[in-house]
Amino acid sequence: MFHGVQGEYRWLETAAHEVYDVLQVCPAVVANKNVVITSFDSYPLQPTSEEMQRGWRTSGRSLHIPVSDNISAIPFEVFNEWYIFTSDSPERDYKVFVKHDWFTLGPAQTVYSRTGNAFDLKRMQRWFWQELEESNPESYLGRGTRLKFVSRNPEYFNTVLRGLSSLARIRAKSAKAPA
């Protein structure tokens, strides 16, 4: 896992964790927030009539979900990229970053892709930070080949960083335990 700071955002990236792990260690990241889902496992979901009654809506290629304190109502296993807002989520065409398996928030030297190069990565990183600056979410959560968690909320960031580190230690100990 590596992490850093970009402007008012703190970020972390890891291949060892999933979206669910973030929700497990810090449910407040999404509880009582508005979430914009920009990437799905297969095809964009159409909200059911029940979900529409709960306030779910589509806008372009994005799915907007008002989340209550019951975060288990979010089908997190099929949603790969989330922009998380404390108030209404802006109607806009959000960029999707998780579909680029070579994309990382870390230094360009940490990854060299089959399809991109360091220049492409730096350009993509610039677009990513511009997207966050323009849309101004409180947090961003994405899982392609690696989990990326970004937040302006230092309390959430620290809770997630500590929680994921603890979870990794627990998993490592249980993997070493004799069967």
Image (spheres, grey):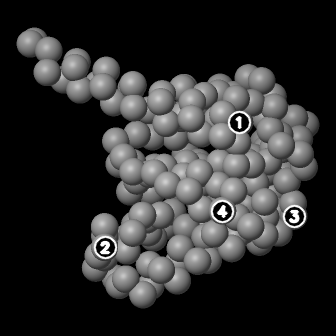
What is the number of the mark on residue 30? 1
Residue 40 in sight: no
Asked which quadrant contains residue 106, the reply is bottom left
Amino acid type, callout 4: Gly
Q: Residue at x 45, y 57 (%)?
A: 144
Mark 3 or mark 2: which comes first in sequence?
3
Front of the two marks 1 and 4: 4
Front of the two marks 2 and 1: 2
Q: Which residue is mark 4?
A: 7
CA gap, disc 2 to disc 4?
A: 21 Å
CA gap, disc 2 to disc 1?
A: 32 Å
What is the number of the mark on residue 109? 2
What is the number of the mark on residue 124? none
Mark 1 or mark 4: which comes first in sequence?
4
Mark 2 or mark 1: which comes first in sequence?
1
Asked which quadrant contains residue 34, the reply is top right
Amino acid type, callout 3: Glu
Front of the two marks 3 and 4: 4
Q: Which residue is mark 3?
A: 91
Amino acid type, callout 1: Val
CA gap, disc 3 to disc 2?
A: 35 Å
Q: Residue at x 87, y 35 (%)?
A: 54
Across and down, in percent, residue 81 comes to: 59, 54
Amino acid type, callout 2: Gln
Mark 3 or mark 1: which comes first in sequence?
1
CA gap, disc 3 to disc 1?
A: 19 Å
Query: Circle 4 sits in a helix, a strand or a loop, which is it?
Result: loop
Left or right: where 93 falls relative to 142? right
Task: Check contact, mark 2 vs mark 1: CB within 8 A.
Answer: no
